[in-house]
Amino acid sequence: MIQKLRQRSLRALLVAWGVSLTAFAVVRLVPGDPVLTLLGDQATPEAVAQLRRALHLEGPLPEQYLAFLTDILRGDLGASIVTRQPVLTTIGQTLPVTLWLTGLGIATAIAIALPLGVLGGATASATYLRAFRVVSSVVIAFPVFVSGLVLLLVVGVQLRWLPVAGYAAFPDNLRYLALPALAMGLPNGMIFARILQQSVRETSREEFVEAGIVWGLPRRELVLNYLVRPSLAPTIGLMGYVVGASLASAVILETVFNLPGVGTFLVRGVLARDYPVVQGTLFVFGIIVVAVHFVADTVAAWIDPRVGSPL
């Protein structure tokens, strides 16, 4: 287990390094000169040189990347060109909203997946399985902004059960996050349920499950410890992918529901061509996904050593 943990740690560090390379390449891959795009053709040479130094766009690419990596290790993601505020400070102020939304979205997905996955894996009803496949395919195919707008119009505007925009401090923030979390959790819940169904079917054929039945174990203990727990490992291993997809969905849903999260901060940075904001936000998102994937992969292997990460 220690050897596997070392291997996963090394892989996580390599992926984190790849995330830094990707974030570094964002500004460099933009067509044209990003400095002239920001300042315009009438900018003075002094202003151009100053902004180029601030964005680490001077010198060969290896030197630029080394300067960028040095800043990251010091906890410096640069300053916003528009607001002049440190990017890390603004991310620290807006990240809790995004984490609340992502956490509630994943909790909603798990609440949907557990009953559907266990029931679908244990049942032999062809009608139920066909109906689930159709419904889950439709839900997964719907873009989150479509389901978010539908929930906003029906539940928020027509029924007026929940607020449609804005934010508040905890615990009132749960009311503002309920609709976007549901829009985020529905497709992920169906994905979780599909994986869990298949895993429950495979686990039910194992010899230790048959032995538990022969020993006459209580049905509750048999289902929870012998069937559900080993079947959760592939689902937990999928968590890294789901968190990445949820963060991408958060960028859209925060805009739809006017939430002051990192997604809204990123969209504003893209529209304003605020390259330090885009670069820093993408890097933070990538590190969060890497960290969650590492933890999920380790927990999945601890629950069932036979199962590795599906990614």
Image (spheres, helix red, strand yellow):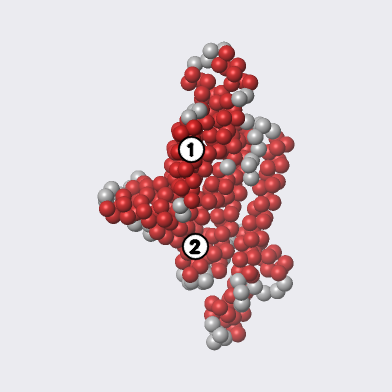
Label annotation for residue 266: 2
Residue 154: percent from left, percent from top? 31, 52
Residue 192 in percent (x, y) is at 52, 40
Q: CA distance from mark 2 to mark 1?
A: 40 Å
Inspect the image, locate mark 2, and give the three-letter code of the amino acid beneath it. Leu
Decide if residue 52 is on the left or right side of residue 162.
right
Label 1 sits on a secondary structure element that is helix
Q: Work out whether 34 lies above or below 140.
A: below
Residue farthest toward the left in the current orientation of the protein: 159
Q: Position of residue 177 (x, y in %)?
A: 38, 49
- Residue 22 visible (yes or no): yes
Q: Which one is in front, 97 or 181?
A: 181
Name the side, left or right, on which 150 lies relative to 93: left
Task: Tell me if 214 is positioned left or right of 219 in this view.
Answer: right
Q: Residue at x 68, y 38 (%)?
A: 5
Front one among 288 and 180: 180
Q: Is residue 79 above or below residue 260?
A: below
Quadrant of image for the C terminus: top right
Q: Which element is circle 2 on?
A: helix
Marks 2,1: beta carbons within 8 A: no
Instruction: Residue under label 1, please give it.
Output: 130
